[in-house]
Image: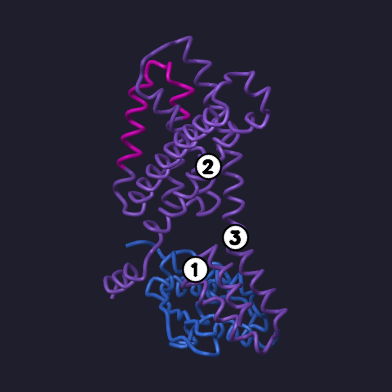
Chain colours: A blue, B purple
Amino acid sequence: MNPAPALGEFEQVVLLAILRLDKEAYGVTIRSEIASCTGREPAPGALYTTLDRMESKGIVRSWLGEATPQRGGRPKRYFAVTKAGRAALIHAQKSYQRLLQGLDLLGDANA
Amino acid sequence: MRSAWIAEWIVARFTDRKRAAAIVGDLVEVKAEKGVAWFWYAIAQVLLSLAWRRSVATIAAVYLGNRISDLLFFRLIQVHPRHPRPDLWVPIATWLILPLGTALPYAAIRYGLRDGLTRFAFAAMALVTAGIYFWWLPAFPVMCATLGTGVVGVSLCNREWRRGAAVACAASVAGLIGFILIGIFFAVLEFVLYPSLWGAGKEFSHPWLMWLPLLLPLGAAWTTTAACSYLHRRFLERKATELATEERGMS
C-alpha cells in the first residue's frame, strides 16, 4: 500500500474546509469557509492551484455541478475528499497532536 | 457579462475549458458583491498562479536544454574523433541530448522531483552523460548495460514510473522530430527565398538568415515542452475515473 501523501499547511486547511462543507464544497464556499474559520481570505489563484494539485495527487476528486444564471451559465466544480486524502489528513493531524502533547499551548494560560 | 467571457477565454489558455468556466463562474458569483476591479484582480492572481510555474519551466528548459546539449555535444565531438568507434550509443546520445536536456529541467520545475517523468528523464540523462564522459573505460559497456537494465527494470515495476518512462521517451522523440522538421523547413525556406545564393555570401547579403539557426533549438524546445505537457496531462495526472476505482479498491 502507498504511504499517505505529505500535506502542506494550506492543503490541510482546504481539506478541512471541504470536509466541513460536505456536499456543498466548491470554490466560493471553500473560500468563505476558510475565511470565516481562520480570519484569512485565501487568494483565488492559490486556492485553485492547490485544488488542482490535490486532485492530481488523488487527495480530492471533483465533478461539475449545475450551471446557474447567477454564474453567467457556468457550472460549479464541486470537490470531495478521497479516502487517500482523508488518510493523509488524519496522519498529518496525528503528527500535530503528538507534537502538541506535553505543551499547554491550547490551555487556559494561553486562551 | 462580456468581461466574464473575455476572462474565461484568457483563463482557458492556461487550463482546460471546463476548469476555466468553473473558476470564472466562481468569480462572477462573487463579483456582484465585490465589484469589477476585484474580479479582474482575482483573474490576474489566478493567471499568475496557473502560468508562473509553466513559464519559468519553459524559460529554464530552453536555456538549460541548450547549455547542457552544447556542453555534452562538444565533449562528444572532442573525444570521439580521437577514438573513433562505431558504437551504437554515439548517434543515439547525439540525438537524445537536446530533447532530454530540455525535458529534464522542464519536468523538474513544472512537476517536481518526485514526478515519474522527472525521475526517468534524470536517469536517462545521467546514463547518456556517463556514456559521453566514460565511454573509453574498458568496463563501460558492462556498466552501461547494467545501469540501463536497472533503469528499465525500475521503470517497469511501478505504474507511475512506467508511464513516466513512456512519456519521457515520447516527448524526446517528439522534440527530435520537431528539430528535424524545423531544420528541413528552414532549409527549404532559404532555398525558396534565395535559390541562387549559397554559403557565407548568402548570409552576408541577407543577415536575417543568421537568426534561423537560433530558431532551431527554440523550436525543438517548444516541441519537447508541448509534448511533455500534453502527455503528462494525458497519462500521468489522475482522472476522476481512476480515483473512483482506487476509492472502491480501498473500501
Q: CA distance from mark 2 to mark 1?
A: 26 Å
Find the magenta span and give its range: B129-153
Instruction: Assess whether residue A16 is covered by the magenta stretch.
Output: no
Residue on which the image places disc 2: B221
Residue B15, position as x, y percentages in the image: 51, 65
Residue A12 placement, left or right of B230: right
Residue B143, position as x, y percentages in the image: 36, 26
Front-lying residue, B129 or B175? B175
The answer to whether marks 2 and 1 mark residues whose Cβ atoms lie closer than 8 Å is no
Residue at the (49%, 68%) spot, across then down: A52
Residue at the (47%, 66%) spot, across then down: B16
**Quadrant containing the C terminus of chain A in the rendered view:** bottom right
Residue B109 placement, left or right of B203: left
Dot 2: few (<14), some (14–19), or many (≥20) neighbours within 10 Å? many
Residue on which the image places disc 1: A52
Badge 1 element = helix
- State the image quarter where residue B232 is shown: bottom left
Numbered mark located on residue B51 in the image: 3
